Image: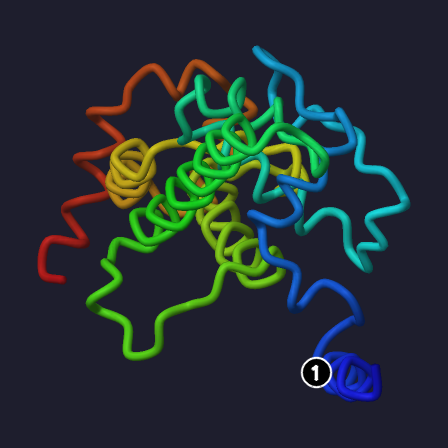
Amino acid sequence: SSHTNASLELNQNNEPPGDKGKRFLSMLLELANMGLVKPGMKLQGIALPMSLLLSNPSHLTYCLEVADFTCDPNDVDIVAAYSKNGVSAEMTQAINAGVRIEDAVYEKLFEFERRTASDVRQTPGRSIGGFSKRIKKYKNEIKEAKNDPRNISKIPLIEVVELQSLIANNVNEPPAAAQSQVQEGGAVALQPDAAAAAGSEGVSSV
């Protein structure tokens, strides 16, 4: 036990205790074991119990949101059957489904970052803290592109293709001063071509 204490202390120095080493797969299986993962239900809708001892529950919520966005819903149905005392064959299937869900999130994060695992010198881990940091960065990009005043937790995920077309459209928009009028006036917003033309004249040299 002295060994585990040492590793706990290490965690506390770097990050809030508890979340750094918590792998997404383990947390997902823990939720399933508690009977909180229900077939046909969104993972993001799960009310996270205090007993998970998370220093920042939103880390896990962000991971579950990406899982809903990208994983195969059938895998959620299969992992829902997981229980620590279950029959081994069924448990193996449930764990495998959990692994596929985690893999889907892992791969989606690279897609969100417009890079691949081979672009990275050090392979990122699969802790909920590490995942959520990357998810929040992406959600901030969406917030900025949509000019959405809400907290990122309220802003729905979109595919990279959608984000890129939003960013491309924003480049063609008039400067910020004109933009605020567009939002208030509404009528001005009906002439995107004129606005784009006005905006691009000065920008063409870039």
- How many numbered circles are shown? 1
Residue 10: give x, y in percent of width and height. Answer: 73, 86
205 relative to 4 in the view: left or right: left
162 versus 74 height, above or below = below
Question: Badge 1: how crowded within 10 Å, few (<14), some, or many (20+)?
Answer: few
Query: Which amino acid type corresponds to the residue marked 1 in the rendered image?
Result: Asn
**Image quarter (top left, top right, bottom left or bottom right) of the C terminus:** bottom left
Q: Secondary structure at mark 1?
A: helix
205 versus 164 height, above or below = below
Which residue reaches farthest top? 40
| Residue for point 59% across, 37% down | 64
Asked where in the image residue 11 lies, by quadrant, the reply is bottom right
- In front: 60, or 7? 7
Residue 85: give x, y in percent of width and height. Answer: 72, 35
Which residue reaches farthest left? 205
131 relative to 154 in the view: left or right: left
108 versus 44 height, above or below = below
Residue 148: give x, y in percent of width and height. Answer: 56, 36
Q: Which residue bears the numbered disc 1?
A: 14
**Image quarter (top left, top right, bottom left or bottom right) of the N terminus:** bottom right
- In front: 50, or 190? 50
| Residue for point 51% across, 22% down | 78
Asked where in the image residue 61 lies, by quadrant, the reply is top right
- In front: 33, or 58? 33
